[in-house]
Amino acid sequence: MNKHKVHVNGIDMVYEEYGHSNERAIVLLHGFCGSSLYWHKVCPQLSKHYRVILPNLRGHGGTEVPDGVYTMETMADDILGLIDLLGLDKTVIFGHSMGGYVALAFADKYSHRLSGFGLIHSTALPDTPVVKAKRLQDIEDIKRDGIHEYVEKMTERLFVESTREEIPDEVHRIKSVGKVMQPEGAIHALEGMRIRKDRSAVLYEANFPVLLVAGSEDHVISPDEAFGVNEGHVPRSTFNYPHISENTFEGIAHMSLVEVPEQLARLMANYLRTLHERETLRIL
């Protein structure tokens, strides 16, 4: 693993890289109050065959904490700046939770730079009024109680109770990542998630296969939300679209990349092979 700092889109970004520079590149985006560390248990399997790039989104993981709302579009521009700097023409992006919102914004703005994308415990749907209100309450909680107490409570929702008991060291590690954030970074990201738009069409209009992953016990983004889209204001399931692959981990909550990393890595690797085979057939 190599850690780097670069200047892109007006900020200093920290990113990690696994694998070899001459391999096909994939980009893994972490979730809210997370960092590239979220993906560490998935990387060993994927880096055998791919160049794995792990950006730390603005305000997270040592990347600069600028003022202003961190919109999903702005963070997508950050990722574009990074892949431009790395000389990548096309890539595949996988986004976990908030990272999935960024992946969708990237696909919306820069679809010509993608060979495919996957959403891991994420959704194309916008925040409901209830969730928007919760975002505002979270902002007030951080301002009042600080980032440590907020992350402590937030992390409890990411895992089922039995998993928290089985892997206490991993749960502690996830908490530690969030607790070192500057509160302003978390607040600006919450503001950005709250105002993000419905990107259902990015899913069902994609001209390549799309991977969706959910956890049956996820109370942050349920399978119904992960596999839901609005088409002409009509709620539909992604099951209706043959290019979208739905996958649910039974008994898993919001953190399959930590709870069952080997299984998630295999699922992602199978998806990547499908993309490669599709591209090979297209060329032939």
Image (spheres, rainbow, N blue to C red):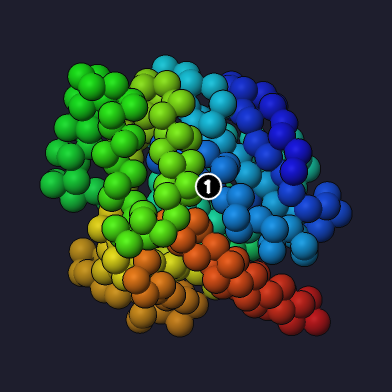
6 or 18: nearer the viewer: 18
Dot 1 alpha-carbon crowd within 10 angstroms: few under 14, some 14 to 19, many 20 or more: many
Q: Is residue 93 visible?
A: no
Kindly identify the residue that appears in the image at 28 percent across and 29 percent down.
149
207 or 192: nearer the viewer: 192
Position of 99 with respect to 10 (left or right) is left
Q: Position of residue 188 (x, y in %)?
A: 36, 27
Q: Is residue 139 above or below residue 252?
A: above
Say which amino acid is labelled 1. Tyr
Q: Is residue 50 above or below residue 82?
A: below
Q: Secondary structure at mark 1?
A: helix
Q: Position of residue 256 (x, y in %)?
A: 45, 61
In the picture as drawn, the residue positioned furthest to the right comes out as 22
Q: Is residue 88 visible?
A: yes
Kindly identify the residue that appears in the image at 60 percent across and 40 percent down.
55
Quadrant assignment, res 271:
bottom right
Q: Position of residue 23 (x, y in %)?
A: 81, 58
Kindly identify the residue that appears in the image at 36 percent across and 56 percent down.
165
For the C terminus, give its image quadrant: bottom right
Label count reads 1
Q: Position of residue 67 (x, y in %)?
A: 42, 17
Q: Is residue 120 above or below residue 281?
A: above
169 or 191: nearer the viewer: 169
Position of 165 with respect to 91 (left or right) is left
For the N terminus, give its image quadrant: top right
Q: Which residue is mark 1?
A: 38
Quadrant assignment, res 191:
top left
167 or 239: nearer the viewer: 167
Kindly identify the residue that appears in the image at 76 percent across and 38 percent down.
2
